[in-house]
Image (tube, rainbow, N blue to C red):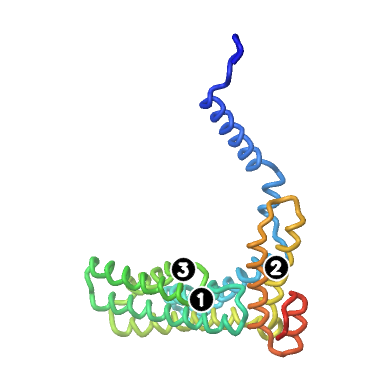
Amino acid sequence: MYPGSVSASPTLTTRTGHLRRTGDALAHATSADAWRGALEVRAADATVAPALRVGIAAALTLVAGGLLGQPALAGIAALGALTAAFARHEPFPRLAVKLTVVAVSLVSFVALGAVVGATGVTTGWQIALLSAAAGIASLVLGAFRITGPGAVIFVFAAMAAVGYASTTADLTAVTLAVLAGALAGWTIALAPAAFLPMGAARLATARALAAVAGLDGPGPRDPRAVRGALAHAREVVAVSARGGHRTAHAQAALCVPTR
């Protein structure tokens, strides 16, 4: 080192680097482009349609309960209608099976909650029983790879039944209410299959193509994520397709051998 020269200490250099990265992060978080991109709804996002289906299912149950003069049961039925919030973007054949699992689980939780409420189980046992049931529900959702709000919806529904049910007649009423709501949610969620049977396949394909196009973009490249998107699209196309003709065309578009 030459006389009189001063070298920057490692600590000072590290702090300067941290400050620079912090400044860059704050600039990105407050930039108009970042907020515009975060709030943009793209064609391949498909976030509006699932939300509308959940809203329609809940509205139907609430209106029906109000017309029947049962506002409390209408709220419990609306929890059953949240069946439509699970397993979104799945191909319809698979969606039907997964939503059936969700509906059966919701009805079972409400029946359990009604039994707990009607029999006057103490608060400690209520917590223990519902906690154990929530763990089982989480295990079931994970085993069937069911995405969505999670087991917390089942716990909410069970606690609503605990608060409502005080007699055996109440047990029957809340169970039928959540069953009606679950059927409404199941039906509304699967209704698009009648006129858009390949909807999930089209969405998965659009996302895969967007991922491939992103390899040429200015952002970071992740070939592994692109391969995952393509594999997912191939799987969804195979499950969704009803006829060999459409399957062959979809596989050709994704560069998948038909044999």
Q: Could you tell me how far apart the alpha carbons at marks 1 and 2 are, in whole angstroms? A: 27 Å
Name the residue nearer the viewer: 36 or 224: 224
Helix, strand or loop at disc 2? helix
Report the residue at 43% width, 74% height from top.
76
Q: Are the residues tagged 2 and 3 within 8 Å (C-beta)?
A: no
Q: Residues within 10 Å of mark 2 (few under 14, many from 20)?
A: many
Where does the N terminus fall, quadrant-wise?
top right
Name the residue nearer the viewer: 148 or 17: 17
Mark 1 / mark 2, whichever is N-terminal = 1
Q: Which mark is residue 150?
A: 3
Q: Amino acid at mark 2?
A: Ala
Name the residue nearer the viewer: 179 or 222: 222
Q: Is residue 213 above or below residue 54?
A: above
Mark 1 / mark 3, whichever is N-terminal = 1
Instruction: State which mark lies toward you, 1 or 2.
Output: 2
Mark 2 / mark 3, whichever is N-terminal = 3
Q: Which mark is residue 18?
A: none
Q: Amino acid at mark 3?
A: Gly
Helix, strand or loop at disc 3? loop
Q: Is residue 234 above or below residue 227?
A: below
Give left or right: position of 54 versus 141: right
Q: Which residue is mark 2?
A: 208
Q: Which residue is mark 1?
A: 83
Q: Could you tell me how far apart the alpha carbons at marks 1 and 3 are, in whole angstroms? A: 11 Å
Residue 149's x, y, as percent? 49, 67
Where does the C terminus fall, quadrant-wise?
bottom right
Q: Amino acid at mark 1?
A: Thr
Name the residue nearer the viewer: 210 or 59: 210
